[in-house]
Image (spheres, rainbow, N blue to C red):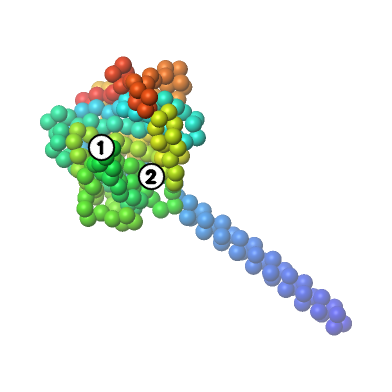
Amino acid sequence: MNERNSSRKYLWLLLFIILICIVGAGIAVTFFKKEKTEPPVLTANFIDASKIEKISKFRSCQGHTVVPQNESESKRNMKHYLVVLPEYTGKQVEVYAPFNGIVNSIGARPEQGLEGEIWLGVRGSEWAVSFQHLYVLDTLTEGQKIKAGDLIGHIANKGIDLVYAVGSREVKMIDGYASPYSAIDSIFSHMTDQVFNEYVGEHVKTRDDLIWTKAYRDQNPCEYRNTEGGLNDIAHPEDWVVME
């Protein structure tokens, strides 16, 4: 009889342990799901759109090679160049935080002509937004929380570079370019309709008007003007979208 009672106790104990494991696993799954955040969505414009002269298309032949490290794409620029109107050149046009998030990093490489760069992201997501060629506010620090619409800096000269990407801890040389990105996308694919509508005009009706598809660029490859990943920007005026 004692053996039977003892067996029942062990059985109940085993069932209790299994139940605790199931509940614990459920809590863990829920926790990690909450920790994983979707890529940031731009809910506010980062600049007064009326001050923009033109924007280079995603996968343009402008500037230099900018591609992800996995070599799925090459010989193209997967960032956007944003140029202000001539009357605003050198006027330090304001740049604002486009969403609620945090300052991932702040840096400057004056030896490469990069006055300042700031990465903004959201906790739990690898994706972030980089603004390059601007004077970052001295009051901002890495890890600081920011809100959509907060002033983060001023354009240093005639424009800024916009990068929406997943950064990598190491750089990889691709076609003469030291790629620091493991994935890149167009920033215009990650903003609300309300924000995007500020760019709509005679030459911009949809987001596709600011993006070359991979198939198009593969069929219409860019050309190099030097051996350091410089692209042939002069021969591709169609890469620029004039804002009106």
Q: Is residue 20 visible?
A: yes
Q: Position of residue 13 (x, y in %)?
A: 72, 73
Q: In the displayed image of the protein, which residue is found farthest to the bottom? A: 2
Q: Residue, x 28% and y 24% (percent of image)?
A: 241
Q: Residue, x 21% and y 44% (percent of image)?
A: 135
Q: Is residue 102 above or below residue 229?
A: below
Q: Position of residue 119 (x, y in %)?
A: 33, 46
Q: Residue, x 15% and y 33% (percent of image)?
A: 89
Query: Which secondary structure, mark 2?
Result: strand
**Residue 10 as seen in the image, left or right of residue 155:** right
Q: Is residue 53 above or below residue 144?
A: above
For the C terminus, give its image quadrant: top left
Query: Which secondary structure, mark 1?
Result: loop
Q: Residue, x 86% and y 80% (percent of image)?
A: 3
Judging by the rendered image, the residue that carries numbered circle 2 is 128
Foreground label between 1 and 2: 1
Say which amino acid is labelled 1. Answer: Gly
Q: In the displayed image of the protein, which residue is found farthest to the right? A: 1
Distance Cα–Cα, label 1 vs label 2: 22 Å
Closer to us: 68 or 150: 68
Say which amino acid is labelled 2. Answer: Ala
For the N terminus, give its image quadrant: bottom right
Task: Report the number of discs.
Answer: 2
Q: Which quarter of the picture shows residue 164?
A: top left
Which dot marks residue 113? Answer: 1
Q: Is residue 52 visible?
A: no
Q: Position of residue 111 (x, y in %)?
A: 27, 40
Closer to us: 82 or 41: 82
